[in-house]
Image: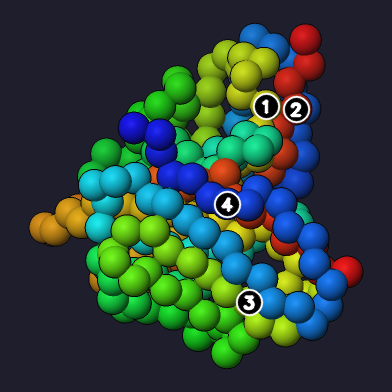
Amino acid sequence: AQSVTQPDIHITVSEGASLELRCNYSYGATPYLFWYVQSPGQGLQLLLKYFSGDTLVQGIKGFEAEFKRSQSSFNLRKPSVHWSDAAEYFCAITYAGGTNNDMRFGAGTRLTVKP
Amino acid sequence: DTGVSQDPRHKITKRGQNVTFRCDPISEHNRLYWYRQTLGQGPEFLTYFQNEAQLEKSRLLSNRFSAERPKGSFSTLEIQRTEQGDSAMYLCASSRDRSGRGSYNEQFFGPGTRLTVL
């Protein structure tokens, strides 16, 4: 069965520093991969998704992610973090033809931004 | 457009009581989803509607949980005989119906209802 692992429960970065949030997946074929952000008191918002094609995916709010099949990873990056990026980030996986039952979310990484 | 709204935002109840939550999706969205999110975990799918039809339920969904979407607009999620393990955030999401190869129905999430069962 497909799954994602987010190895870092909590990350702290300084404002203006670069950011990389890790996501490792487990699935035998080509997965569909997603990154969501959840701010306090808010619902989840889709940052970006990967289905196929170009392995470097651009998203909203200046985020990007790179699909690396050889490493089974889909890490999220941002070159310069803003204080408003402080939130919980979730990686998720499903696959072509998968149902809603087949979507799996990681446990999340909480990002703190230091001034 | 006000996005997806959920009511109430917080609910505290005693074990054994019934609770009902409401979700109002984005008006032109015909798909509606319910998720549960426990502390320190990502969301877990509960059920999904297309218009008023409940098309999919989680394989793990207890029969104490029931959801309705009577007119294909708002939805309610009821939990009967609540247990302490039901304490969680209940998220609702909605999406348009996009068909076609490679299409993805992006879900827009509400702020959630936080349930505490004492």
Quadrant of image for the N terminus of chain B: top left
Q: Work out whether B29 lies above or below A38.
A: below
C-alpha distance separating marks 4 and 2: 29 Å
Label 2 sits on a secondary structure element that is: strand
Q: What amino acid type is highlighted by mark number 4?
A: Asp
Q: Residue at x 58, y 81 (%)?
A: B65
User: Answer yes or no: do the residues labelled 3 and 2 have beta carbons within 8 Å?
Assistant: no
The numbered disc on residue A86 is 1
In this view of the protein, which residue sits in the foreground, A70 or B1? B1
Q: Residue at x 66, y 71 (%)?
A: B19
Quadrant of image for the C terminus of chain B: bottom right
- Residue, disc 3: B79
Disc 3 vs disc 1: which is toward the camera?
3
- Which of the 4 image quarters holds residue A95? bottom left
The numbered disc on residue A112 is 2
Label 3 sits on a secondary structure element that is: strand
The numbered disc on residue A57 is none
Q: Residue furthest right?
A: B118
Residues at marks 4 and 3 on the same chain: yes
